[in-house]
Amino acid sequence: MNIVFLGPPGSGKGTQAKGVADKFNLTHLSTGDAFRDAINNKTELGFEIKAYVDGGKLVPDELVSKVVFEKIESLKGGFLLDGYPRTVDQAKSLENFGKKKNIAIDAVVFFDVAFEELVKRLSARRQCPKCKEVYNLVNKPPKAKDACDKCGSALLHRPDDQPNIVEERLKIYTLQTEPVLEFYKGHPGFRKINAAQAIDRVSSDIQAALKA
Ligand code: AMP
């Protein structure tokens, strides 16, 4: 099975992706995590994309698609795309790539949450830079202050989760990513989830949607 998670920043895609990937034995592909790793490891890709990511802008379509397709081609089993596609051009590229390589997208899960809730969530979000676990100081706090429950690393407040950058990201989401919903609305595997609910409720709704 191959799945796409669609939704605004802070809607819980990353939080849910890990559980779903484990449950259905999929590789979790987060473009955001891959880009942050490239920046932290100071790779050539990292230098190329740093200004976009830190400023809350989208990395150019061609570059993102190249990174994603190389990764998909290196995989054996199914995958879960978290944060890609984010523009209609990316969605079309994915469709063309799939046709050429005989790879189908079976489900598209849309995480529906109101923007006011997202702003609150993003200011309280923390992430482990090592194992990528996502926390929220309000509804999913780490056991020890500022340390990852899983690996003990110091948690980070992402630079692009600062209020002025969040505003820019939500604007870009409305302009460039929302049209991707239209692109997928006729897809037989399109499912809309109420992602404003508690984390466990969202997990069970996703699992029910994927089994249906
Ligand atoms: P995320 O962790 O998904 O919020 O992504 C963090 C940042 O990485 C975004 O704000 C963009 O700068 C970049 N990024 C991630 N995925 C994409 C994508 N599909 N297209 C363009 N830029 C992306």
Image (tube, rainbow, N blue to C red):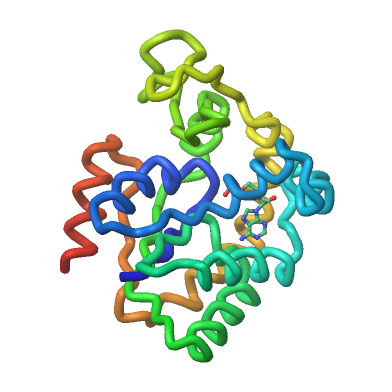
Residue at image coords 40%, 64%: 79
Residue at image coords 49%, 90%: 99
- Examine the image and state in which quarter residue 87 appears: bottom right
Residue at image coords 57%, 70%: 179
Q: In which quadrant will I find the N terminus?
A: bottom left
Residue at image coords 38%, 82%: 186
Image coordinates of residue 31 in percent, x first then y, are 58, 54
> Would residue 39 appear left or right of 90 to someone viewing this image?
right
Determine the residue located farthest toward the bottom in the rendered image.
Answer: 100
Image coordinates of residue 52 in percent, x first then y, are 78, 49
Image coordinates of residue 100 in percent, x first then y, are 53, 90
- Examine the image and state in which quarter residue 165 appears: top right
For residue 209, above or below residue 167:
below
Image coordinates of residue 204 in percent, x first then y, are 19, 48
> Would residue 189 appear left or right of 46 to someone viewing this image?
left
Depth order, front residue of 80/173: 80
